[in-house]
Image: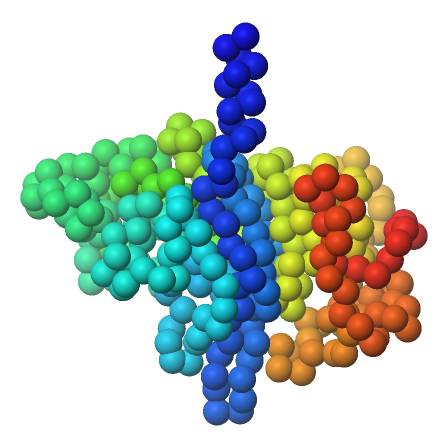
Amino acid sequence: MSDNIEIISSQTQAPILEVSDLSVSFHLLEGVIPAVAGVDLVLNQGEVLGVVGESGCGKSVTARAVMRIIPTPPGCIDSGRVMFEGRELLKLSEAEMEGVRGDKISMIFQEPMTSLNPAFTVGNQIAEVFRFHRGMGRREAFERAVEELKRVEIPDPAKRARNYPHQLSGGMRQRAMIAIALACRPRILIADEPTTALDVTIQAQILNLIGQLQSDIGMSVILITHNLGVVATMADRLVIIYAGRVVEQGSVDDIFVHHHHPYTHGLLRSVPRLDRPTEELVEIKGIVPRLDDLPAGCVFSTRCEFVMDQCRQLEPGLKEIDVDHSSRCWLEKTPW
């Protein structure tokens, strides 16, 4: 009986993060670039949400808007709401937001070498998190930093804590970034392409580490990637973004087995499969359009092999395909 109560309560919990109608633009000399247009996404308690799309589709801009680290100018959050545990993050003062970043919500960036400060040791950079958010003294904070390096499985953590970023391998630098991000046991971790610069073996180790720590801490994770294969076994739900818009969202099963949008179909066909080793990979024709020169109608119409006249004239809205599964497409039935 108690197990049933626990299951029901976990399903009815309010989402830990809700992003509604988020739009972000960049005001440059050549004009205004609409980078994100009306993005909606929901992150539930203890969930891993994969955000997938090609480079330049607005994934990282969406994440940075949630963290309020869009450079302004030239960036501007034009509209939307970001609700975190009942607080509207876009309405917080910068001082209030500093109390959220790194403590309640943390982020891992694509390239640790450019995110870590080359002038300070790795241990001091982790210790600074404890000093800022927990008010610890230098010695206590540094001791905790060593513990965090051990937690992310860096060998000889006491020695590595005294190393500078350039003295660590790429995999170790990314582990150090994870240690910084998780030092205060945040409620949400945003991992923005955390394995892009790493070889395949190290990629798997980093993803396994994030998954293990997510389970240990009980945090929610937004995993941003351009590769559907990366999130296949790790994510609970997926959001597919193209040209600054959510084009499909649903459970992993919805996306991998019952996907509806041609862009999702194209992404899946470009991923190698072990169960079909002889199957030819098919790339999506063309490139992501310039965000300041989008086609009329559906933004994917110029690359879609199933395009209809209606697609070139009117932009579709997100429509419900099934429970918690929606797609931005005029197709009634999928031809695949």
Q: Position of residue 35 (x, y in %)?
A: 56, 72
**As drawn, is 252 to the left or to the right of 202?**
right
Q: Position of residue 118 (x, y in %)?
A: 25, 62
| Image point (90%, 51%), residue name | 333
Quarter of image, res 295 = bottom right
Quarter of image, res 285 = bottom right
Q: Position of residue 209 (x, y in %)?
A: 44, 36
For the question of whether residue 200 can be seen, the reply is no
For the question of whether residue 62 can be seen, the reply is yes
Image position of 14 with respect to 67: above or below: above
Q: Position of residue 308 (x, y in %)?
A: 90, 68
* Depth order, front residue of 76/169: 76
| Image point (68%, 42%), residue name | 324
* Depth order, front residue of 126/336: 336
| Image point (48%, 91%), residue name | 29
Image position of 168 with respect to 23: above or below: above
| Image point (15%, 37%), residue name | 143
